[in-house]
Amino acid sequence: MFERKTVFVVGAGASNELGLPMGGALASNIGDKLQPQGTDFRASLGDAHLTRAINLLANNSDDRGARFFRAAQVISRAMPQTISIDNFLHAHADDEILIQTGKLAIAASILEAERITKLYVGRDTDRVSFRAVADTWHRTFCKMLCEGAQRTDLDHLFDNVSIITFNYDRCIEHYVVQQLAVYFDLTWQRARELTNKLTIIHPYGQVGKLDWQNSPMVSVDFGREPPPQDLPAVAAQIRTFTERVEDVEIMQRMHSLINEAKIVVYLGFSYGDMNMELMTTRESAGLKKIFGTSFGLSVANVDRIKHAIADSMGINVHPEHALLVGSKSNELLSDYWRPILKG
């Protein structure tokens, strides 16, 4: 169990260990799905399921259909040039139809990606194959979480740990509930009750809730493809950067977690300007230990990232208190298990 208040900040690189696409790959997938297959709004897009969902939204209106088709074309053309779909949608925050089209493509892409992860076994079961995820941070995180815990006192299992994930998928929630059920020999109902106690914030939203989660969001089973008429409701739960900044409650919850934490761990996170801005607190977050992955980043970029982290928390980060290592998420947790777990 975690002994000091710890916040994990999770990015696309962490989910990539399970097989989900990172920013560039996700943008490419979205571009393919929205690629027009003809010359007018009645033509299909690269993804038939997405085409049906958009046709339903167009509601047989020539003008509205043309606007969706135009938005799909604009997005598809731009995807090879963008850092991420989030950055692109932020640039077009004034275009309602384009934003809606982009969210539909995100939802379709992420739900499809869940189906090809190491967590997805098949339509007829929610169980996961633990051997298949042996080299992922999800497994190591749960092993850290369960160390020293007893099944007679599990209500406080998550007291000192929370997660801020900038990903749309539900892999963390899906894995944790499986781990608790198997490791502690719990009923699924009990494992789900406990997992609902884990604070997980998705700043940009998620592709629906899992059926056991306490949330007003529309429910979508892990990795399942919702009917075309339901996809807009799933997509509506995704938030752009602009929308998230305007959500005061979510921002306050995020900042409160960071302020209270003694340890902050960045996993597979890109440290992009928009995301760092979302986490910037208005007051000093106080002295804390910082661990983070910097896989594939240059020394110069890592140095600037340390300053960006310090600025986001309103603190002076000394080298001995900020450790960014050129490894992936699972390797970081494995190598720094004790310092993270014990503080």
Image (cartoon, rainbow, N blue to C red):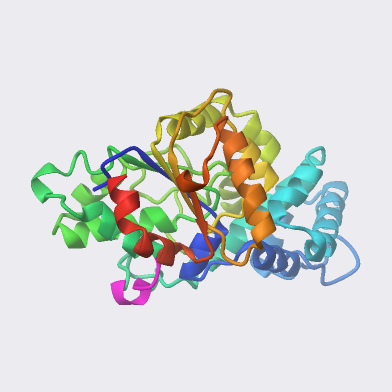
In the rendering, at what x and y percent does residue 222 appear? 43, 60
Q: Which residue of the protein is positioned furthest toward the right in this rendering?
A: 39
Judged left or right of residue 222, residue 128 is left
Asked if residue 53 can be seen in this view, the reply is: no
Q: Is residue 261 magenta?
A: no
In the rendering, at what x and y percent does residue 25 appear? 66, 68
Asked if residue 338 can be seen in this view, the reply is: yes
The residue positioned 61% from the left and 60% from the top of the image is 108
Q: Look at the image and give the residue range highlighted in magenta.
A: 130-136
In the rendering, at what x and y percent does residue 187 appear? 16, 54
Q: In this rendering, is residue 267 above or below 29?
A: above
Judged left or right of residue 52, residue 78 is right
The residue positioned 26% from the left and 52% from the top of the image is 145
Q: Which residue of the protein is positioned furthest toward the left in this rendering?
A: 152
Q: Nearer the viewer, residue 260 or 174?
A: 260
The residue positioned 36% from the left and 76% from the top of the image is 132
The residue positioned 63% from the left and 42% from the top of the image is 307
Q: In this rendering, is residue 271 above or below 12?
A: above
Q: Nearer the viewer, residue 144 or 320?
A: 320
**Which quadrant of the view contains residue 188?**
bottom left
Q: Quadrant of the C terminus?
A: top left
Q: Nearer the viewer, residue 52 or 282?
A: 282
In the rendering, at what x and y percent does residue 281 appear? 56, 29
Q: In this rendering, is residue 313 above or below 178?
A: above
Judged left or right of residue 210, residue 99 is right
